[in-house]
Image (cartoon, grey):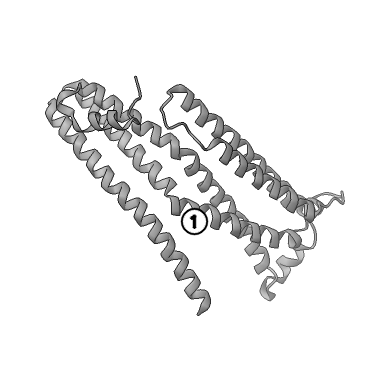
Amino acid sequence: MNCSFDDKETSLSKIADFSDSDLTATLEEVFNRFDRLVDNNNVEHILTRRLAFIGSLMVLFGGLVMLSSLDFLAGVATTLTNESIFNSLTAINFTFNIALFDVIFLCFSTTIFLIYKLYSPLDKKCEGKSTKQKVKLRKDKLDLCMNLLMAFLLLSLLTIKVSTIAGHFLFFGIFIFVTAYSGNRKYGYTRSWSRNRLMRLQVELLYAEKKLGSDTDDNIRQKLHILLSDNYVQMHKDIVGDYIEYGDSALKFLAKKKS
């Protein structure tokens, strides 16, 4: 299928002039458009959500260890924080250097950021399979980095004294969670991905109605027009709403800190 929906003149004619264009071709064009939009936001959606999850786990671990220093948890603190988990389970005395942990962690973070930036630009013209392959390559590289990062964090947790690494986990975890969550919230990666994915599914259902002959072409055109109209309105609300809510959240946080 020829994906020329991103051209302004073509897109306007395909959306507005339903009566003069073949309905099947129109549905295919609209489906391809939303399929591309899903790909455009898929990597950012997955990356920010996964980073937020990793950050929350790091915050949880670091916070629990810090709380274990309280008097009523003194027994737990003595058992868990005086040595690394690896040393407590084996007779081998091996400790991973905390400074090296910071350096490697920053290297992982920089690598993930660079891969994201280097592979984030997608051609505005739909290129079919080449675009799909570009998105898949980008996802595969980021998945590899994320898996290596998780393996590194687990290794560090086992080989560094718990009381030493807890503060670093807490600090980096808060930084990762706030950056990933606020970035997703401000730019609406998950909202955009979900909205366009829903539109793609709805257009697919209209395509099925056309093939099954369960409704007339005029009714299907009307349904498609309503779907596109509602999507434009929702897209506007999401863009403005995400920006305003993000700013309001930041201002409320600063107001609490001052009070």
220 or 1, which is in the foreground? 1
Q: Which residue is mark 1?
A: 182
Give coordinates of residue 163: x percent, y percent.
74, 63
Kind of residue at badge 1: Ser
Q: How many marks?
A: 1
In the rendered structure, the answer to whether residue 195 lies left or right of residue 20 reads right
Q: In front here: 205 or 69?
A: 205
Q: Is residue 226 visible?
A: yes
Q: Quadrant of residue 6?
A: top left
Query: Compared with residue 106, is residue 163 higher up or lower down, i.e. above or below?
Result: below
Q: Is residue 156 left or right of residue 257?
A: right
The answer to whether residue 215 shows anywhere in this view is no
Where residue 45 sits in the image (x, y, percent)? Answer: 47, 43
Above or below for 66 versus 230: below
Q: Quadrant of the N terminus?
A: top left
Give the answer, above or below, for where 119 lies relative to 189: above
